[in-house]
Amino acid sequence: MASTASSTPSPNGTLNSAIPDGPLPEKWTRYKAKAKLINPANKRKYSVIVVGSGLAGGAAAATLSELGYQVKCFCYQDSPRRAHSIAAQGGINGAKNYQNDGDSVWRLFYDTIKGGDFRAREANVHRLAEISLQIIDQCVAQGVPFAREYGGALANRSFGGAQVSRTFYARGQTGQQLLIGCYQALEKEIAKGGVKMYTRTEMLDLVVVDGHAKGIVVRDLTTGEITSHAADAVILATGGYGNVFFLSTNAMGCNVTAALRANKRGAYMANPCFTQIHPTCIPVSGDYQSKLTLMSESLRNDGRVWVPKSREHAAKIRSGELMAKDIAEEDRDYFLERKYPSFGNLAPRDISSRSAKEACDDGRGVAKTGLGVFLDFSDAIKRLGRDKVEERYGNLFQMYEKIAGEDPYETPMKIYPAVHYTMGGLWVDYNLMSNVPGLHVLGEANFSDHGANRLGASALMQGLADGYFVIPATLPNYLASQKPGTVTTDAPEFKQVEAEVKDRIAQLMNVKGTKSVDSFHRELGMLVWDKCGMARTAEGLKEALAKIPKIREEFWKDVRIPGSPDGTNMELEKAWRVADFIDFAEIMCHDALAREESCGGHFREEYQFTEKDEAVKSGYTNPGEAMRRDEEFAYVAAWEYTGPGVPPVLHKEPLVYEAVELSVRSYK
Amino acid sequence: MNLTLKVWRQSGPTAHGRIETYEAKDIPAEASFLEMLDIVNTGIIEEGGEPIHFDHDCREGICGACSLAINGVPHSKEAGITTCQVHMRKFRDGETIWIEPFRARAFPVIKDLMVDRGAFDRIIAAGGYIDVRTGSAPEANSIPIGKEDADEAFDAATCIGCGACVAACKNASAMLFVGAKAAHLNILPQGHPEKDKRVLAMVRQMDAEGFGNCTNQYECEAVCPKEISADVISKLNRDYAAAIVREAVAE
């Protein structure tokens, strides 16, 4: 499986992960030593398209421009500063070991592999852990105002799935501060002319010429104009697909279109069933709801999660007869502390989410709908004082109060899991290049680093690692094989894709049905949340796979898009995205059905530990915990699109573990 | 609850706008303001009309996209929140609500309630950054920064670039936006080398974009969803004065 860094791109259709030779800790160093370079005078002859301006895309666009490439960057928002990376609250991991608490690159690597339930690629994750050090340096130099100690050194806090404090943070808005650092670097390059920025512009399709990704077709969201853009390489940094569930913590505009279009043009979609349900979100309150709001995982540092021990008490809380404070200490079930004594409230996200679901399924939920658990700060306020709690979490408490209408200093928050992040994404090799040569995929849009579950504060780390440090080193490997500027938008492939895009828009406009786009999106979302959400069964997934084509048929028969495609038309934008979500949902359910095991965020009810299993008898794990089946499923599932209405074809990349031993994940 | 909405409708950048009236019926008090508009829009679409266009994205108060003036106040009369964080429980049943875009010469209307805030990006591009090439950074803890300075820089850095400060100002001044960025970067030691160049370039770009002057009304501070203090404007004025003197002496 090992190939050298300088190998030529894998031919379309095979899965060559291009992992460099050598011992794990030396792979990235060796890769860089051998990787191809492009001399400074030639760099400016190469053009690169970057789609997306979040941490991955913005960092890539800025850095590639600094290096001398001609960059075109696209985002659907009105400014690159608004990409959804901005909403990340808690922090970014870096193995600096500033706390002297035993952290190291190895430990961050190991925590991430284990947190991902042994379904990520060792070499990529080790590289990520190595680069985490440089990211912190870079961000500080840009002026990112991380939290500091009185002596002037950087502060850290702990996060789920780790027993060291390695998370750097900027109050509850780390994502916004990192993104602004990245956005400022991008604007600097825009001013210098190295990056041409296209805001309010959405990629609607990928153009492949002679098997290589050479451009994109976009729609100007203000004028409605459809145009083509050609380049020597294409980078997608378009985020995740969480909005397939309709309700998620993603921004309203987040969508799967770029990734799905690439999939339809030949790029494989990897592990789409690995979706992260975040344990601490504000519970759903009604069917008018448009999105869910995350409460940072950092709150679990000081907040204690509990429900009443008895269903009677829970019922009385739901009806308003009792308040949280009326429940005596001995009548409370701090279920995470009980089940996972060594990690307690900082158990990883998948495990914490499932535990909350179990408590609510048991009739002990505390929100009106029955779907909610307490996150209680009264002990922290007693221990640290209100001021300290306010300093740590003030803006999060304020946000909660605005939305929920309750004051968390006085009464515990109510939280429930919600779709938050997607570990799956387009398949990439060690170069972050998909199986379509020239098409590179960064950040949440690729599948590469988080396996079946992502640890907190690792998404920001991966986005910036990919954009600032990985792609600048790996892109020349591809570009060196390409003569610059050989493909232009005059190529017939561009005309063809442009015609297909215009045709699809005309089709959407011509449906002239009766139902709003949102109504279809909501229907799809409820279906996949129900059948492919926190718990999945073969039966349920088959049911979803039978229903999705009906939603699609109904959509294309009865959707109503008012107005004209020539100009701003938010219903048309949503309709295109929802049509793609419908197609994507099918791939996701196929993947969930084919993966007959439970791992990380993918929990198949058929595969869980019971009292009969040795690991339970010995006390190593609990009944109900996820049961992986390494012998059959230690692989990356990469799905090839083979035509409309035809099930996708599965390709497997075996996951080979050289440095770590696969074990049952225990956080007890 | 039932409400009457008076909404600014404008079909395109060059079209004439007008106020139109809509009835918002059976709105749950727990809904957010934008969810109320979603409900109204669904009704408009089902009746064959064109929905009310507005900018929005994260809907959790951080991306800075949403930009409605509600009853004449950018975002909300409630302190420290964005439009998307306004909830209907704050309104009375039967109330009439006026909804308009953020208005300023430098923010032309695109459609209905959407405006073009590209001028803010161009101000940042002029100098709102620290010019540090990726890979050239020193070790992160090699520059100690006292907690007070770090906190002060952070307070200024919380700006989300929404433009409420401009929309609230009778002169459509962008001084709070520019002052916040200048303060964030000028307070930090990493930002010192480019301090003068930064403030001169940003202020000149701000003027070129057609923003007005500051006349100390503090409307900007009152509507800022991140409650950035107008002290950053005084600091910008001091930094600008020092920079212009040094520039003159150098010439």
Image (tube, rainbow, N blue to C red):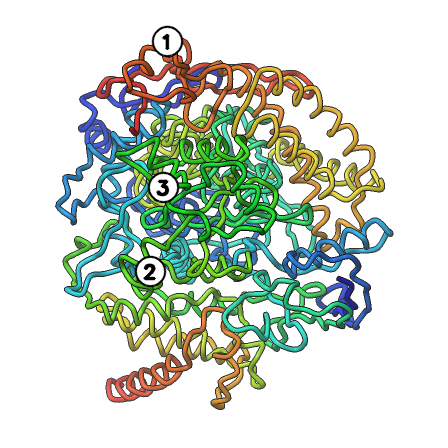
Q: Is residue B219 above or below residue A410?
A: below
Q: Quadrant of residue A15?
A: top left
Mark 3 sits on what residue? A456
Q: Chain of mark 3?
A: A
Q: Is residue A486 above or below residue B82?
A: above
Left or right: A145 in relation to A485: left
Residue at the (31%, 19%) spot, across then down: A664
Disc marking residue A631: 1
N-term-proximal mark, 1 vs 2? 2
Q: Chain of mark 2?
A: A
Left or right: A337 in relation to A484: left
Q: Is residue A173 above or below residue A572?
A: below
Determine the CA span between mark 2 and mark 3: 20 Å
**Tag nearer the camera, 2 or 3:** 2
Residue at the (38%, 18%) spot, across then down: A16
Please state the horizontal and vertical placement of residue A455, each as a whole percent of the image: 35, 37
Residue sitting nearer the eye, B74 or A33: B74
Determine the CA span between mark 1 and mark 2: 47 Å
Q: Which amino acid type corresponds to the residue marked 3 in the rendered image?
A: Gly
Q: Quadrant of residue A633?
A: top left
Q: Chain of mark 1?
A: A
**Tag nearer the camera, 1 or 2:** 2
Report helix, strand or loop for mark 1.
helix
Say if residue A445 shows up in the picture: no
**Are discs 3 and 1 less than 8 Å apart at CB?**
no
Q: Which amino acid type corresponds to the residue marked 1 in the rendered image?
A: Glu
Image quarter of the N terminus of chain B: bottom right
Left or right: A125 in relation to A228: left
Report helix, strand or loop for mark 3.
loop
Left or right: A664 in relation to A605: left
Image quarter of the C terminus of chain B: bottom left
